[in-house]
Amino acid sequence: MANENLDNRFELIQETFSNPEFKTKLGRILSEMTPSELAYVIESSPPHERKIIWDLIQLDTEGEVLGELDESLREDLLAGMNPEEISAAISDLEVDDLADILQTLPEKITNEVLSLMNSRDRGRVEKILDYPEESAGGLMNTDVITVRAENSIELVMRYLRFLKELPQNTDDIYVVSKKDEYLGILPITKILTSDPNLTVREVMDTEFSPLSIESDQIDIYNQFKTKDLFSAPVVDENNHLLGRITVDDIIEVAADEAEQDFIGFAQIEEDIFASPKKSIRNRLLWLSINLLTAIIAAFSISIFEDVIEQVVYAAILMPIVASMGGIAATQTLGIYIRAEAMRQLNRKNLRYLFRREFIVALANCVVFSLAIYAITTFWFANPSLSLAISLAMIFNLLAAAIFGFLFPHLLRKFGYDPAIAGGVVITTFTDIIGFVSFLGIISFLIA
């Protein structure tokens, strides 16, 4: 129902653009929408409408909308704002969200925006900016509530009432020493249900392990998933409490990782409604690479020009071998990328996974080589041709499994993302193996 209402509002906004007095009506519609709904509307609109919509969004909402947008679109909107406008828009955001936005800006603009903040907020943001964006330090929020172990539960309750408002998504309070060393967590539920005369030390959980400031975001995601966490403290190498990470940050990590893998695998742009210029520039690169690899595959076929002239049926059957190898290699590549993304690969299970993929490939070889032998024999009544395509199928499916597993592993060793760079190269490799093996076997049988 919520999605249906949002779609109806979006259609109403599109109709409003054709109204002579559209700005007044559009501004009224936008003022009734949440930041996430506004982000959806902006992302779903063509570039020339985005600027109009953005200019009509209220200043106190702009920061939250920026936090909801895809990074590329956020960069486009921020590029049209001066440091004063950016500072005013993001001033009320949570520290971690504020840092996320500043990390997308050029260093000069970031420094100018920081200079416009008060010293307290600037110090908290700079602490996060010192760490890589995809680490615990880059994800954490420094807004935490801390208490001492010797405090009574009654004193803690009075302190919370004095604060009046807790940081967003607070389910635990953190217990620290006088040197701000992490000692444990004190769940809100225990504060509410424990005897007020007890001390924090008697109630707190000391077995909860904090996150290291250098932890990678995927490792953090896996910990949240396996331990069913809502929030977790972050400490430095000396066990000093620095901040916390909450489940909303982890949901964003999971969504971003899934989106980036899909974008990289398909080699498409992040912004669906990006300008033609940006889309052309992005796609030209990958289409050029694909053209080059296709030429290499075509050249491998040209070597066997005489064979194709003698056995015309070979031209009909070549795509079958190439296609089967390409699909098999892509499946293996997908298995590797998923296992790697979930941080499930290590030296021991890497060997097991490789053996498993090889065994699966052998089974595929038996099934599909026999199937294609029977089909081509029935189709062309040529046993030599059937034998050639069956053997080529075996070679290509085995090569697909081996190369589809080892190539992304090598890419990662050299610092490249196999989700982006693997697909094009692997399919070209299996195409060439398929063409050369099939035509090579036919030429041998003819000779």
Image (cartoon, grey):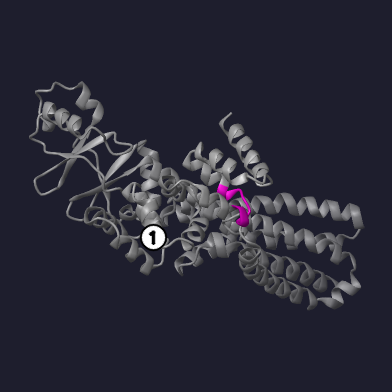
Does any portion of residue 355 appear in the rendered image?
no
Report x, y in % for residue 405: 55, 59
Image check: 109 left or right of 150? right
Is residue 267 shown in magenta?
no
Q: Is residue 282 above or below residue 335?
A: below
Give the magenta part as a residue range. 42-49
Q: Secondary structure at mark 1?
A: loop
Q: Is residue 301 above or below residue 88?
A: below
> In what quadrant of the picture does the C terminus appear?
bottom right
For image coordinates 79% across by 61% down, the residue present is 319
Report x, y in % for residue 299: 75, 77
User: Which quarter of the picture shows residue 415?
Assistant: bottom left
For image coordinates 55% across by 45% down, the residue present is 40
Dominant secondary structure of the residues highlighted in magenta in the image: helix
Residue farthest to the front, as pictured: 21
Q: Nearer the viewer, residue 16 or 255?
A: 16
Q: Amino acid at mark 1?
A: Gln
Does any portion of residue 70 appear in the rendered image?
yes
| Label 1 sits on residue | 103
For image coordinates 86% across by 62% down, the residue present is 316
Report x, y in % for residue 198: 10, 25
User: Which quarter of the picture shows residue 135?
Assistant: bottom left
Q: Nearer the viewer, residue 181 or 313?
A: 181
